[in-house]
Amino acid sequence: MARTAIVIGSGIGGLSAAIALSKVGVKVEVYERTSELKEVGAGIMLYPNAITALRKLDVYDAVARAGSFGHHGKYLTWDGKVLVELNFETVGLAGESIGIHRADLQDALADHFGRDRIHLGKSLVGFEQNGRIQAKFADGSTAAADFLIGADGLHSAVRQQLVNDGEPRFSNCFAWRGIAHGEFVDLPQESGFIAFGKGLQFGGMAVGNNKYYWFGAVADKRGARGRTTKMDVLDLFGKWAAPMPQLVEATPDDEILTHDLKDRDPISTWGKGAMTLLGDAAHPMVPFMGQGGCQALEDSIALGAAMKEAPNVEAGLRKYESMRKARTAEFVKQSRKAQSSSMTSSPIICGLRDFILPKLPVNLLFQTFHTLNSYEQPDL
Ligand SMILES: Cc1cc2nc3c(=O)[nH]c(=O)nc-3n(C[C@H](O)[C@H](O)[C@H](O)COP(=O)(O)OP(=O)(O)OC[C@H]3O[C@@H](n4cnc5c(N)ncnc54)[C@H](O)[C@@H]3O)c2cc1C
């Protein structure tokens, strides 16, 4: 008889895990807290490791149709001087990278999995194990299956019951994000940029259909503190070089997202018995390498492959965890390093950065990106 699984959360992690498990013959139902399947109005960069995973999930075509391929990028100073110009392939990012609106990625995953098996308005409040596993929801309903995947994000209720390690760690940075509509001559299709100031950075990239994703990150120990409007963003980035203020201007005020950036220290226990964690629930990281979602996709492939070969559920889940812990812990660490080097407020270090970056061989500069491609993902 086919194994059955409950996946908690319909983000990138939950939906990709649901597809991977279905591909290896598991009968999956997804339970999502929100009453509507609606991703935040922001973009996401999918690096070659994520593209490999999407191909294995058979979702590549839909993502490639909706998004925008990224082939080149620039590092700039806040006033527009080019520090580094790079072609993704020459820095070890051989393979495709795609910038996409998060809602388009979610649609592609949800359509492929099957929306009739995504149960909305189901907020998990706890689970019980007794041979099988039973999930309990805030509306009083329950669901049972052979195993459960906690893909419920940064504030995971599944993780809380498993390890109870409290609130995530605030990184002393916050970020604004938005999607601008229009034409920006300084930001052609197939390219992106990141510009650096003192304790500030701003990035932008095309995400398909004449839409452009931008983010502004701010080092501030106090967090965003209600600074959520376009005027707040322009207060810090309004005098930066084109197209940065223009991207902010071209974003509706009520569509600007504000988030304090958080992560957690890696943990050694991801699961117990017939349950495990996946994506941000297992290994949230600060977004300075753009790998949180990509790692969730890698997790889903490892999970599917481990369950395909496993003699029993527990063996499969522990195998999956052993395949993923070290790699994701490394990205948590490297993402913190990327934050400290790119978000420094020290005028001396910023000056040194702007002086040294153009002189470094690009290959050396993107050493950590090479690890993205040196990881073999199993077949499903
Ligand atoms: C500013 C910023 C920029 C980023 N840029 C990138 C990037 O370019 N590339 C990249 O790869 N990553 C990026 N990331 C990281 C990426 O967004 C996350 O790692 C990714 O979304 C994690 O997916 P997930 O499915 O694990 O969690 P989530 O996307 O958080 O999904 C969790 C889901 O679970 C649901 N849920 C929560 N609690 C419950 C409950 N109790 N019961 C039922 N459902 C529940 C939620 O509603 C949600 O739908 C960025 C993050 C930030 C903050």
Image (cartoon, rainbow, N blue to C red):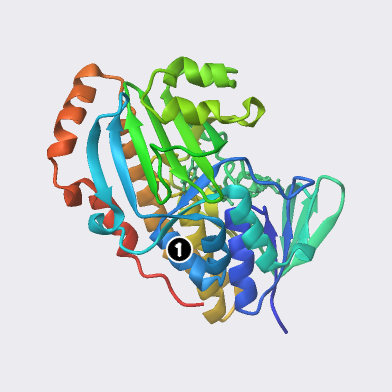
Some atom of ligand 1 lies within 8 Å of the CB belonging to the residue at label 1: no
Classify residue 62 as left or right of residue 92.
right
Q: Nearer the viewer, residue 135 or 217?
A: 217
Identify the element where label 1 is drawn: helix
Looking at the image, residue 81 lies above or below residue 94: above
Looking at the image, residue 15 lies above or below residue 26: above
Going 52% across and 77% down the picture, which residue do you hit?
Answer: 380
Image location of residue 259, percent across then percent down: 55, 30
Disc 1: CA contacts within 10 A as few (<14), some (14-19) or many (>=20): many
Q: Residue farthest to the bottom?
A: 1
Classify residue 152 as left or right of residue 348.
right
Identify the residue under disc 1. 51
| Total numbered badges shown on the rendered structure | 1
**Residue 256 visible at all:** yes
Going 29% across and 33% down the picture, which residue do you hit?
Answer: 76
Classify residue 273 as left or right of residue 204.
right
**Residue 162 visible at all:** no
Image location of residue 365, percent across then percent down: 21, 45
Q: Quadrant of the N terminus?
A: bottom right
Q: Nearer the viewer, residue 315 or 262?
A: 262
Q: Nearer the viewer, residue 167 or 261?
A: 261
Going 79% across and 52% down the picture, which residue do you hit?
Answer: 120
Image location of residue 199, percent across then percent down: 35, 22
Q: Residue farthest to the right?
A: 140
Query: What amino acid is at disc 1?
Result: Ile
Looking at the image, residue 220 lies above or below residue 330: above
Classify residue 184 as left or right of residue 369.
right
Image location of residue 122, percent across then percent down: 79, 50
Residue 50 falls in image quadrant:
bottom left
